[in-house]
Amino acid sequence: MTVKGPVPAEKMGISLIHEHILVDFIGADSINIKRWEKSKVIERSLPYLRQLKALGCQTLVECTPAYLGRDPLLLKSLSDSSGLNIMTNTGYYGAGNDKFIPNNGLTETADQLAKSWIAEWEKGIDGTGIKPGFIKIGVDNGSLSEMHKRLIIAAAKTHLKTGLEIVSHTGPAIPAFEQLSILKKEGVSPDAFIWVHAQVEENPNNHIKAAQLGAWISFDGINDNNVKEYVKLIKNMKENNLLNKVLISHDAGWYDPGKVNGGEYRGYSAIFEKLIPLLREEHFSEIEIKQLMVINPATAFEIKIRKIGQS
Ligand SMILES: [Zn+2]
């Protein structure tokens, strides 16, 4: 589901699964869509999106959650101008000690949270008619707090109604496995879950373990200077026959309304210009590269309810 409506998963093409156009870290108590001028953000970001299109990319998954600068109309306008498919999301981001969760969200039950996220899927976001293409949540580094347990339970309930993939800002293995065990209790298959920022986890055996359960492993902080480390992470998955569970992206962008002219904007080209050539040198086949860039994103983001024992 893109900001312009449904696109068949097999037509997503080359995809970047974790990027940003705009992020505002001011906090849920002060965020306001008037803090940025759409025309300025477009002027700043569009050249990078056009460059990405020229590199062969067709779909960009925009991971900025609500209360952190999610702006579906901005994304739609950028999709129109760049020719890229762009996806947005529903859900709440709890990482950062709940600074980005609105007050009412802090006291709601998992059922109430799920109800408002499902409503965005059914009716569109904030009266725009634009629907989310996935669920984005975020949890802090250690063992899950009660609030963050509610977020993953709400994500599970939303998934079972909508078939939207759960994309969770997670980092280390401890909260990753805790979320997977909650999903299990809720009857949701691990392949409905993307372990975001998995590169932060230092023990690569945990990547293997989670992927063997069926979870998606997202190595998503690629830039011009760290591609070698990422090749190592990806090779480890390949050697364990788990390349079919790997997602890669830059976590790049973005316009920051808190900074002059949006601050520094990081482009989305390192995977195409640095990482893929290096994978070829390391004897990755074209089929394996297609697996990473086309097949895995389409499989992960396809709208499909994934219950335990059925996928
Ligand atoms: Zn991100």
Image (cartoon, rainbow, N blue to C red):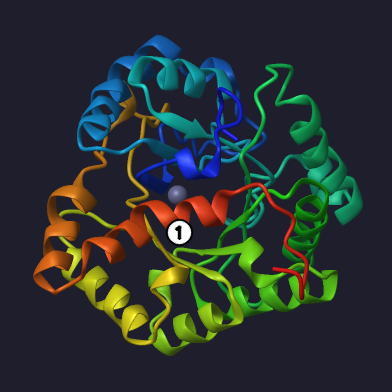
Using the rendered view, name the quadrant where residue 70 is placed. top right
**Would you place residue 279 above or below residue 302 in this image?**
below
Is residue 156 rendered to the left or right of residue 289? Answer: right
Look at the image and tell me in which quarter the N terminus lies.
top right
Q: Nearer the viewer, residue 208 or 23?
A: 208
Look at the image and tell me in which quarter the C terminus lies.
bottom right
Using the rendered view, name the quadrant where residue 169 is placed. bottom right
Q: Residue at x 15, y 54 (%)?
A: 224
Is residue 90 rendered to the left or right of residue 238? Answer: right
Most distant residue in the top direction: 39
Q: Residue at x 38, y 70 (%)?
A: 199
Label 1 secondary element: helix
Amino acid on which the number 1 mark rests in the picture: Asn
What is the tally of numbered marks visible in this picture? Answer: 1
Q: Residue at x 68, y 78 (%)?
A: 178
Is the residue indicated by label 1 positioned so its CB lies within 8 Å of ligand 1? no
Q: Which residue is mark 1?
A: 296
Is residue 140 rendered to the left or right of residue 289? Answer: right
**Would you place residue 55 above or below residue 182 in this image?**
above
Q: Residue at x 75, y 53 (%)?
A: 159
**Would you place residue 77 above or below residue 245 in this image?**
above
Is residue 260 rendered to the left or right of residue 276? Answer: right
- Image location of residue 108, percent across then percent down: 88, 49
Q: Residues within 10 Å of mark 1 (few under 14, many from 20)?
A: many
- Image location of residue 209, percent across then percent down: 52, 86
